[in-house]
Image: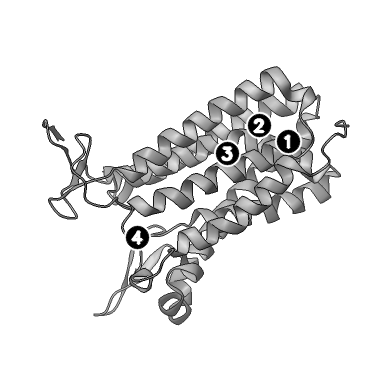
């Protein structure tokens, strides 16, 4: 990485090291770090509310598989349906079939935040039913920690030089050398910073105003802020797939709108004025 007055040349290898043919990559590491931090934060919130330890233990698996499956299916079906419906095995397994025959391990190349959110919501609904918890109490606790995961994922995108921004002459522009030599907005970094700030706001509200905030507020705030920011940051990004060319709003923006509406409802109207159990 070379820093000049005009831009930051960025070209890290996505792979940290290779262990006996198994590639250890920044994306997987940061995904795991984010998930681990979320698990610790939610565990702390469970203890704060005197929820039994045995109730917490299965939550990790529900969240992990809900996010992973939802994010993967979201990318495949929202952004590349023609390809993946013709190659359904690649949608499920982290491999790619080669034109000359055979296959190679690639990891999951493509995870969509909108799909991950939907997958998480469904898995939490299953968990809440099994544990006989109020669904909104559960998603409120998850929402407090979620921005940490979102921050780590965008840092992972930065390390992969993916989801890049549009060309710019700003002094903090990044030159993603694996893409081209144009200085561009580090859109991944913008999002990572925004989500970390949201996490700090969440913690501040929880520490100082938790008993005054109605059930569903944290969930609503999380959806509203993340997907509103996601809507506007898309104006600084390159389109991810070719069919978005010429669209007034791209796929990420259209998918963000329902989440913002749902977030506003839960933040401003759902059980407002009612005390938490």
Q: Residue under label 3, please give it.
A: 146
Q: Residue under label 1, please give it.
A: 56
Name the one closer to the observer, 221 or 85: 221
Measured from the top left, where is residue 79 in percent x and y?
44, 68
Q: Earlier in the sequence, mark 1 or mark 3?
A: 1
Name the one closer to the observer, 30 or 107: 30
Q: In which quarter of the image is residue 26?
A: top left
At numbered mark 1, what does the secondary structure look like: helix, strand or loop? helix
**Residue at the farthest front position:** 248
Q: In the visual, does 192 lie left or right of 71?
A: left
In this view, 180 is above or below 56: below
Measured from the top left, where is residue 243 in percent x and y?
37, 74
Alpha carbon separation for disc pair 1 and 4: 33 Å
Alpha carbon separation for disc pair 2 and 1: 9 Å
Which residue is drawn at the image coordinates 79% and 23% (left, top)? 211
Neighbour class for label 2 at 10 Å: few (<14), some, many (≥20)? many
Q: Residue under label 4, please give it.
A: 106
Alpha carbon separation for disc pair 4 and 3: 27 Å
**Is residue 56 visible from the viewing direction of this image?**
yes
Alpha carbon separation for disc pair 2 and 4: 31 Å
């Amino acid at each position: 990485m070379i820093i000049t007055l005009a831009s930051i040349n960025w070209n890290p290898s996505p792979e940290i090291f290779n262990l006996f043919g198994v590639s250890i990559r920044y994306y997987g590491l940061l995904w795991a770090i984010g998930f681990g931090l979320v698990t610790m934060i939610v565990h702390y919130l469970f203890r704060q509310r005197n929820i039994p330890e045995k109730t917490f233990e299965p939550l990790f698996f529900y969240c992990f598989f809900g996010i992973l499956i939802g994010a993967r299916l979201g990318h495949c079906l929202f952004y590349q349906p023609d390809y993946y419906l013709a190659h359904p095995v690649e949608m499920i397994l982290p491999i790619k079939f080669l034109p000359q025959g055979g296959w190679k391990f690639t990891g999951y190349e493509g995870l969509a935040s909108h799909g991950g959110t939907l997958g998480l919501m469904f898995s939490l609904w299953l968990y809440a039913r099994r544990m006989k918890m109020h669904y909104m109490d559960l998603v409120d606790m998850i929402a407090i920690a979620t921005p940490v995961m979102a921050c780590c994922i965008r840092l992972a995108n930065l390390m992969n030089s993916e989801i890049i921004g549009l060309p710019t002459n700003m002094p903090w522009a990044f030159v993603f050398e694996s893409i081209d030599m144009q200085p561009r907005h580090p859109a991944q970094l913008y999002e990572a910073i925004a989500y970390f700030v949201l996490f700090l706001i969440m913690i501040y509200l929880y520490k100082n105003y938790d008993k005054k905030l109605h059930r569903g507020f944290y969930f609503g705030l999380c959806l509203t802020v993340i997907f509103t920011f996601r809507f506007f940051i898309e104006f600084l990004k390159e389109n991810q797939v070719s069919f978005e060319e010429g669209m007034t709003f791209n796929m990420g923006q259209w998918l963000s709108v329902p989440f913002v509406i749902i977030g506003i409802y839960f933040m401003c109207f759902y059980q407002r004025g009612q005390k938490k159990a």
